[in-house]
Amino acid sequence: MKKETALLITAMMTFAMMPWQNTEMTVVQAEETSAEEILDQSSQSRHRLIVYFSRWGNTDYHQNVDASTSASIILEEEQRYGTTEYMARMIQQYTGGDLHLIQTQHAYPEDFDTLREYNHSEMDTEIFPILEESDLDITQYDIVFIGYPIWAMKVPQPIFSFLNEYDLTGKTIIPFCTHDGYGAGSTYEEIAAAIPEATILEGLALKSGEVPDASDTVEQWLREIGISQNTEDEKNEIPITITAGEQELEGILYQTALSDEIMEYFPLTVSMIGFGGREFYGGIEFIPENISSGQLNFENGDITYCPQNNTVAIFYAQTDRPNLTMEVIPIGKVTSELDIFEQLPGNVDITFRLGEEN
Ligand SMILES: Cc1cc2nc3c(=O)[nH]c(=O)nc-3n(C[C@H](O)[C@H](O)[C@H](O)COP(=O)(O)O)c2cc1C
């Protein structure tokens, strides 16, 4: 990989004040340090987390809201995404890792003017909205992307609620944001000031209207700051074997906090049921804790975990019903031919084990 120079912002807090207050902070910019050198330091365990805040997921929208009635919604294949959420998912597509939506307990107002006033009062009175409870275990991650929409030229307050709640000391932090023309402003410095002793890599700001077509820009940025592509990085994939009835298949597990947790139960036999000509699924007897945001679609070969009904599934064929009714989190993939799933009986024990296990 080409050695790229990263913009490092080292924030040194001189007073034990609240991080978002206007402290005497020294921001050392453009230190000539290779991003690769920084990332190598954490190469033992390179779990990546992409946390983001978006209006979508945090707003009392009326039921039929869509991209034509709210500027903050991107509609794709009948799925609605927040603008920053969409960018977060682009990053995940390239790097792998877990997604986490920062959700406040109180939803924000839908009406833009009301929201603008609400936000101003939150900022002026330094209110840090209470976040929804979450099982997120931040200690599992070394590289944390932090995404947000620009609100009144600043970082929205829920991001600071998150930074208060979770200890990011010593981690590599990568900010990203979406906006309507203002750019990132000084928000990366705001983030740096709130996380003493973290390494902050150069962020990316995308104009909201350009987000849906920005995957090349996102990839180029990630390459430039030294983030490897998940699919090309074998260290991020763990070979597994899957025994389905009499058949033995090969696959991989992504190295995420959730799949690590599930892997602890290997060899894991799940009594599965064929469903809809597209998947086999079955319940597991433990409840994983490292739950990240899921998705309502699948690729053939996906091995997934569904938090809502505590099941593991293997998807093997797209059908004329590509959308799922419950969110699933991909934890790995079957890499062998998928035809055998067409031949399996409706009820079958499927065993997952590490590549070398018997
Ligand atoms: C309360 C509020 C304040 C905003 N302030 C700014 C701003 O100062 N500058 C700007 O360029 N965009 C501003 N925007 C636009 C958002 O940053 C932009 O639409 C963003 O992509 C929305 O992301 P989301 O869909 O993930 O919430 C503001 C939007 C809201 C709701």
Image (tube, helix red, strand yellow):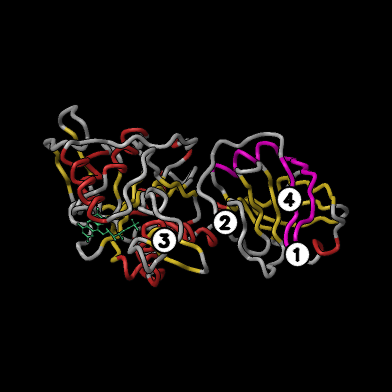
Comparing marks 4 and 2, which lies closer to the viewer?
4
> Which image quadrant shows ligand 1?
bottom left
Residue tagged by mark 1?
338
Q: Is residue 164 left or right of residue 43?
A: left
Q: CA distance from mark 3 to mark 2?
A: 41 Å
Would you say the residues marked 1 and 2 are in contact, meaning their CB atoms lie under 8 Å apart? no
Q: Is mark 4 within 8 Å of ligand 1?
A: no
Specify the quadrant of the image occupied by residue 81: bottom left
Comparing marks 1 and 2, which lies closer to the viewer?
1
Q: CA distance from mark 4 to mark 1?
A: 15 Å
Residue tagged by mark 4?
281
Across and down, in percent, residue 161 comes to 31, 37
Q: Amino acid at mark 1?
A: Leu
131 or 135, nearer to the observer? 131
Q: CA distance from mark 4 to mark 2?
A: 27 Å
User: Which label number is shown at residue 234?
Assistant: 2
Specify which label sits upstream in the sequence, 4 or 2: 2
- The N terminus lies in which quarter of the figure? bottom left
Specify which label sits upstream in the sequence, 1 or 2: 2
Would you say the residues marked 3 and 4 are in contact, meaning their CB atoms lie under 8 Å apart? no
Q: Secondary structure at mark 4?
A: strand
Specify which label sits upstream in the sequence, 3 or 2: 3
Q: Is mark 2 within 8 Å of ligand 1?
A: no
Q: Secondary structure at mark 1?
A: loop
Residue tagged by mark 3?
65
Specify the quadrant of the image occupied by residue 203: bottom left
In the rendered structure, does residue 281 fall within the stretch colored magenta? yes
Q: Which residues are magenta?
A: 257-283
Q: Amino acid at mark 2?
A: Glu
Comparing marks 1 and 3, which lies closer to the viewer?
3
Give the answer, above or below, for where 130 lies relative to 115. above
Q: CA distance from mark 3 to mark 4?
A: 33 Å
